[in-house]
Image: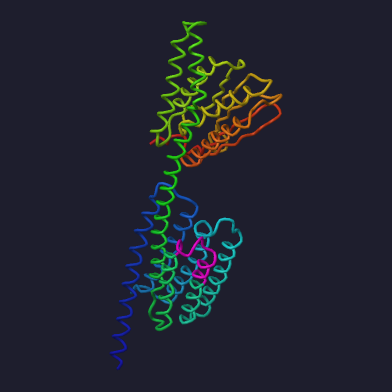
Amino acid sequence: MINSYENYTEYIAIINLVFILVSMLLAVVVLVVAVQMRSHSRRMGWFITAVLVAVGGLTFQIESVSITTKDPRLYLLASWVMYAMVAPIFGLYFIETERVEGQKWDGHFWTLLQSLVAVLVMIFALYGGNFFMLNLVFMMQYMIVMIMLLISSKSIRASIGFLIGACFPIFSALTGVADTRLDTVGFGIIMLLLIVFFGYQVDTERELLVKQTELSENKVSLLMEQIHPHFIYNSLQQIALLCDEDPGSVKNAIFNFSGYLRKNFEALTNEGMIPFSQELEHVDTYIALAEILPSRNFYVEKDFEVTDFYLPALVVQPLVENAILYGIGMSTEGDKIVLSTRIEHGYIVIKVSDDGHGVVTQLPSQKKRKSVGTQNVKTRLKILCQGELSINKTPNGTDAIIRIPEMLAIPQKQ
């Protein structure tokens, strides 16, 4: 009878060791892949933190089964303390991932609730060491996770993977309740995090596909706004008039017009960022073309503190166009446009200012076209470089300000 009990205990120890080693292997693989990902959002940061804490628990658990360890129970209890901290971190991950947009209270509520349960686990671990109660409280932690997902997720379908993943820690705790010598909670947590990681990857791919579709549609829309039939008609008509008034300037006018069209069409094939100098060429081409059109005289000043950076194509030229056509072109006063760049608080700042003021003569249809073009620029900045555009109107004119994170705009030297 004694031999049977000892054999059973040895089997339990072997099972625990196998689960620990498999869990550690899976955790290391997921951690390496996650760290090497090109971009890290805040939610990915919480995920990596949860994996690191789980690895810490597995390390203590491995030490508890080592033959050289003098007090294995102490290391085993330490592993439980580490495992208890994973659920609150998962709550922080949830805030950034599955919480319905607009819900500000719920994510913090669930994290606080999980933290209180984690403290309860720590109390049992430090002062009781009752593994039956530890498994019960641990199971309660992940029951709360499931309730959290059911109540506050965007949709049940969207979080079904997380719900399945949360079943692993619960089943691990149930086996511990059935036999306190079985300790597979680390495996349950790693399986949850593994499923979460795959869910994150699927979400990322889905978001990327949506952004690519949105970007493609935006490119076509922007091109149609830029190459407006009315603008083409006016340009060709003015070039025709130049044939009689100033034949010597016709050739340059045609070159400027064709260069303007070429730059706009090139934007359709540009999937990434381009050098600022290339965008500036397009700006200069448009300015030269605009100078031949019948409009009030204007001049452009340039004040560049930085030029060696990248940005999406067709984000500065439309703003200069707006300044010419709608800033000074539709106002009774003003004739100056300033294009400037600078580095400010970790951002590349590009500013297009005009001093158009006085009585505004802009028609509703022109205002609508201007707002569509501005929205296109905002969309391209957001998708391609996490940039933003703000329009500030003052009594003395309008400021259009682009802000792009410096780390995304300036190539890193190898």
Residue placed most toward the observer, 139 or 389: 389
Q: Which residues are magenta?
A: 144-159
Q: Residue at x 44, y 35 (%)?
A: 220
For residue 26, above or below residue 6: above
Q: Is residue 314 left or right of residue 389?
A: left
Picture coordinates of residue 195, whole percent (x, y): 39, 63
Q: Residue 69 in the image: x percent, y percent?
A: 38, 73
Q: Relative to residue 266, is residue 90 drawn left or right?
A: right
Q: Position of residue 290 (x, y in %)?
A: 53, 18
Magenta span contains residue 146: yes
At 50% from the left and 15% from the top, the residue drawn is 237
In the image, residue 305 sits, relative to residue 409, either above or below, namely: above
User: Residue 291: x percent and y percent?
Assistant: 54, 16
* Residue for point 62% across, 20% down: 336
Lateral position of residue 362 relative to residue 166, left or right: right
Up the image or down, 385 lies above or below 316; here it is below
Residue 71 visible in the displayed image? no
Residue 408: within the magenta? no
Q: How many marks?
A: 0
Check the image and report above or below for 412 versus 71.
Answer: above
Residue 40, visible in the rendered structure: yes
Looking at the image, which residue sits at the far bottom?
1
Q: Quadrant of the N terminus?
A: bottom left
**Res. 63 image quadrant:** bottom left
Quarter of the C terminus within the rendering: top left
